[in-house]
Image (spheres, rainbow, N blue to C red):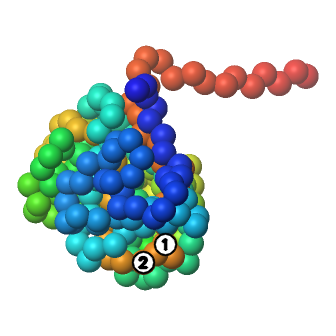
Amino acid sequence: MALPATDTFTTGPSADLENYGAGNWTLNSGGAGAMRIVNTVDAVHSVNVDENLYHWNADTFANDQYSEATASGAAGSNSFIGPAVRVHASAATGYYYYVSSDSAYLSKLVSGSWTQLGSTGSAGGNNLRRLEAEGTTITPYAAGSVDSSIGAQTDSSIASGSAGLSGYAEDAGHRLDNWEGGNLGSGPVARRIFVTHC
């Protein structure tokens, strides 16, 4: 396959994330069926009360990468879901940024050991959520802008892996859709120049 990888979670019968379609998702943490696709809305939600973590296994990602998806539905205050980056091929290891109705957390799992890197009590809600890993800088985005309540964090625990998804607690009404994962661009950044004529 080719990057960026995408998934709209379109399925016939509802299915555990690791058991639907072409089998492009690998479960890293949370137990079998930790996240599930709801066929009536073609979106994925968290099931287990655990640090649920998956990675996309159909492509190889550069170390500098991103993962993004749109949060939707009536989220509860204790149900979280969001993108993940640098998720290990098999271990319970990766960075993730997940949200509830009223809060968001940037965290990491390293061999199953959880550490919070940053949190906010006001950046929850439904919008595009994106997580980037570039070198030792891990940056969460909400609706196209850096989540300034958390900000970019520096961490060197996880150097490589794959883009993925994360969740915590069961809430079929709090969902993610239109996932995309890919490599961060290299080379100079294109800038738009505005010229004013007098």
64 or 35, which lies in front?
35
Kind of element beneath mark 2: loop
What's the residue at 48%, 40% (across, down)?
Answer: 6
Say left or right for 147 vs 34: right
Furthest residue toward bottom: 77
Whether label 1 touches label 2, CB < 8 Å? yes
**Three-letter amino acid code at the position of disc 1:** His
- Image quarter where the N terminus lies is top left
User: Which numbered marker is on residue 171?
Assistant: 2
82 or 25, which lies in front?
25
- Image quarter where the C terminus lies is top right
Residue 44 in view, yes or no: yes
What's the residue at 42%, 46% (across, down)?
Answer: 21
Residue 81 in view, yes or no: no
Residue 5 lies, in percent from the top left, at 44, 36
Residue 48 lies, in percent from the top left, at 28, 74
The Cα atoms of the two marked residues, 1 and 2, are separated by 6 Å
Residue 73 lies, in percent from the top left, at 56, 72
User: Which numbered marker is on residue 116?
Assistant: none
Quadrant of residue 37 within the rendered picture = bottom left
